[in-house]
Image (spheres, rainbow, N blue to C red):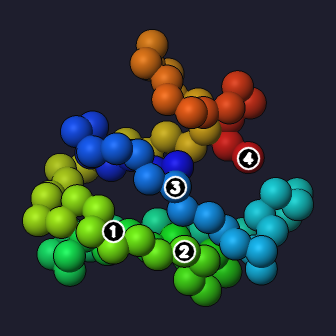
């Protein structure tokens, strides 16, 4: 579940069937967003595109520095996060 912009609805990108990331091993996972390319959001794992979404945040910009939360946020306004953090 990805939420880059508070004013937009969260989106869900799936790892798909070929990527098992909850197996106790280390994995390379990247989330790439390009607002200048029609708002393309891409989830990459092990160097392969697992999921892609177009039209998310098109024309928007992110601040120069941002915080990333994996799992449950520390705010009083959680959305759909687990109690145990990153899975």
Say whether disc 3 or disc 1 marks the residue closer to the N-terminus: 3
Tell whether label 4 touches label 1 (CB within 8 Å). Answer: no
Tag on residue 33?
1
Q: Is residue 55 visible?
A: yes
Count neighbours of disc 3 (C-alpha within 10 A) and say few if under 14, some if 14 to 19, many if 20 or more: few
Residue visible at 56% across and 43% down?
70
In the drawing, does residue 1 fall left or right of residue 9? right
Q: CA distance from mark 4 to mark 2?
A: 18 Å
Q: CA distance from mark 1 to mark 2?
A: 12 Å
Q: Which residue is mark 3?
A: 12
At horizontal 27% and vertical 37% (from top left) the residue drawn is 6
Q: Which residue is mark 4?
A: 87
Q: Which of pointers 1 and 2 indicates the residue nearer the eye?
A: 2
On screen, residue 2 versus residue 21, left or right, reads left
- Alpha-carbon distance for marks 1 and 4? 22 Å
Q: Position of residue 46 (x, y in %)?
A: 67, 80
**78 vs 24, nearest the viewer:** 78
Residue matched to label 2: 51
Asked if 7 appears above or below 51 in the picture, the reply is above
């Amino acid at each position: 579940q990805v939420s880059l912009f508070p004013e937009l609805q969260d989106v869900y990108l799936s790892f798909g069937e070929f990527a098992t990331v909850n197996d106790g091993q280390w994995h390379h996972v990247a989330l790439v967003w390009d607002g200048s390319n029609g708002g393309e959001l891409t989830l990459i794992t092990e160097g392969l595109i697992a999921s892609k979404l177009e039209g998310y945040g098109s024309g928007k910009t992110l601040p120069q520095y941002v915080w990333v939360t994996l799992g449950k946020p520390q705010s009083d306004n959680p959305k759909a996060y687990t109690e145990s953090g990153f899975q």
